[in-house]
Amino acid sequence: MNMSRGCTLREPEFERAPAVRWNSIRPLTGKFLGVVSAMLAIFATVTAQTAKTGAAAVEDHLEKAESYLKANDQDTAKRELEAVLAIDPSNAEAHANLGVIAFSEQDCQAASRQFRKALEIQPALTKPEALLGICAKRLGDPAARPLLEKSFAKLKDKQLRLEAGMELARLYDEQGDAGGTAAVMRTLVNLDPDNVDVLFMAERVYTELADDTLNKLALLAPGSARMQQVIAERLVNEGDLKGAIDHYRKALEIDPRVPGVHFELGEALLQSSPADAAAEALAQKELEAAVAIDGESAKTECELGDIALLESDPGRALAHYRHAFELDPNEVRAQMGLAKLLTEDKPEEAMKYLRMAVKEDPLNGSAHYRLGQLYKRLEMTELAQKEMHLFQEIKQAKDRLAALYNQMNRQVKSEDPAADQGGVPVKP
C-alpha cells in the first residue's frame, strides 16, 4: 500500500488553535484598555466637578449663615453652619461661628467645644481663642489665664478686647495679682476712656491698690518722711491745706532732701494763701529748693511764674512760662500762662497757646472761657459762641461733680474762668 498517495499530513487542531486564539485576543486587549482609560478620565472629571460643587455649597451655606446671624435668626444660621460641617467637617469658620452662637446663648460648655475644634484646625485664630478664654474663666477652668493673656495682647476688635480684658482683670483680682489687674485696667481706660463699667472697675482697683500700698508703707516705715508725705497728700485731697503743710514740714524735718516734698509744700503754700506776700516768699524758697534737689521741671517753672504774676512782675513770669513750655510743650499751665501774658499785645500768639490748652485738656473750662473771650475780641463770633457754650457745659458738669464729691466728703475745685490751671487768681 502506497501510504503517500492522496494523503497529506496536517497540523493537529490542538497545535493551530492556540495561535488562532492568541491572535484574536490582542486586538480585544487594546480596546479594553481604551475603555478603562476613558472611564478613569470621566471619573476624574466627575470628582473635580463634585469637589467644585462641594466648595461652592460650603461657601453658599456660610454666606447664608452670615446673613441669618445679622438678622438675629440664630436657629437658621446654626442649621446652615451644620450643613457646612456635613460637607467639610474641618471647616474652622463654621466651628467658630457655632461657638459664637452657643456663647451668645450663654452655653459655655458647647461654645468651648466648638472653639477648641476651630483652634485645632487653625491655631492662629485670635477671636475664638479669646472667647474660649472667657468661657474658661466663667467655667473656672485654669486654662483661662494663659488663653486670655495670649489673646488680649493680639486682639484688634475693640469690643471683644474690652470684654476679654475685663475678664482677665477680674481673674487677676480674684488671684490677688494687684499689679496685673492695674496694668490691664490702664490699657482698658486708654482703649475706651468713656466706658462707665471700665471706669468703675478702674477706680475700685486703683483705690484698693493705693490703700494696700499705704498699709504696707505704714507697717514698714510709719515714722518715715514718705509716710508724712502721703498723709499730707491725703489732706490736700480733702481740702485741709493747713494740715497738709504741717505734715510736709514734718517730712522735711525727717529728711530735708526727700524728692518731691519741697515742690508739693510750695504748691500748698501758694494755694492756702495766694495773696499773702509772706506765703509767696516761703513758697518761692521751697520751689527753689525743689529745683536744687529734683532738677528743673515744667511744673516748678509754672509755680514760679504764678508767684511772679502775684508779685506783678510779668516779665519774670513770662520767662518762667516760656521755660516751662520749653521743658514740656504739653504742659497746660505753661500754655495758659503764656496766653494770659500775650493776650493784650499778641492775641494771635495767645490764641495759638489757648488752642493747644483746650486740645490737651478738653475739660479745662478756664481755657475755653479765655479762648471764647479772645475770639470775641477778634470778632470771630461763631467760634466765640462755641467756646462759651463749652465753658458753660463744663462748668455745669463740674458743679454736679462737686455735689457728688460733697457726699463723699471730698472737695473739687470750682470752675473759675479767672483762675489759671494752678488755681492762682489772675486778672481776666
Image (cartoon, rainbow, N blue to C red):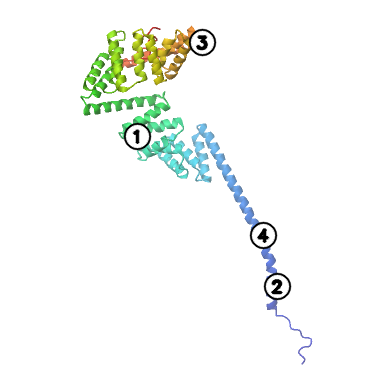
Q: Residue 374 carries which label?
A: none
* Left or right: 273 as drawn, with respect to 123: left
Q: Which amino acid does label 2 sit on?
A: Val
- For marks 3 and 2, the one nearer the N-term is 2
Spatial distance from mark 1 to mark 4, Cα to Cα? 70 Å
Determine which residue is flagged by label 2: 20
Q: How crowded is mark 3: few (under 14 residues within 10 Å), some or many (20 or more)?
A: few
- For marks 1 and 3, the one nearer the N-term is 1
Spatial distance from mark 4 to mark 3, Cα to Cα? 90 Å
**Going 29% across and 11% down the picture, which residue do you hit?**
281
Q: Residue 382 carries which label?
A: 3
Spatial distance from mark 2 to mark 1, Cα to Cα? 90 Å
Percent coordinates x, y for residue 23 in the rendering: 70, 70
**Going 35% across and 11% down the picture, which residue do you hit?**
308
Element type where label 4 sits in the image: helix
Cβ atoms under marks 1 and 3 closer than 8 Å:
no
Residue 221 sits in which quadrant?
Answer: top left
Residue 110 sits in which quadrant?
Answer: top left
- For marks 2 and 1, the one nearer the N-term is 2
Element type where label 1 sits in the image: helix
Residue 272 sits in which quadrant?
Answer: top left
Query: Number of marks in the image?
Result: 4
Spatial distance from mark 4 to mark 2, Cα to Cα? 23 Å
Q: Residues within 10 Å of mark 2 (few under 14, many from 20)?
A: few
* Left or right: 283 as drawn, with respect to 88: left
Q: Nearer the viewer, mark 1 or mark 3?
A: 3
Determine which residue is flagged by label 1: 171
Percent coordinates x, y for residue 425 in the rendering: 35, 9
The residue lying furthest to the right in this view is 6
Q: Which amino acid does label 1 sit on?
A: Leu
Determine which residue is flagged by label 4: 34
Q: What residue type is labelled 3?
A: Glu
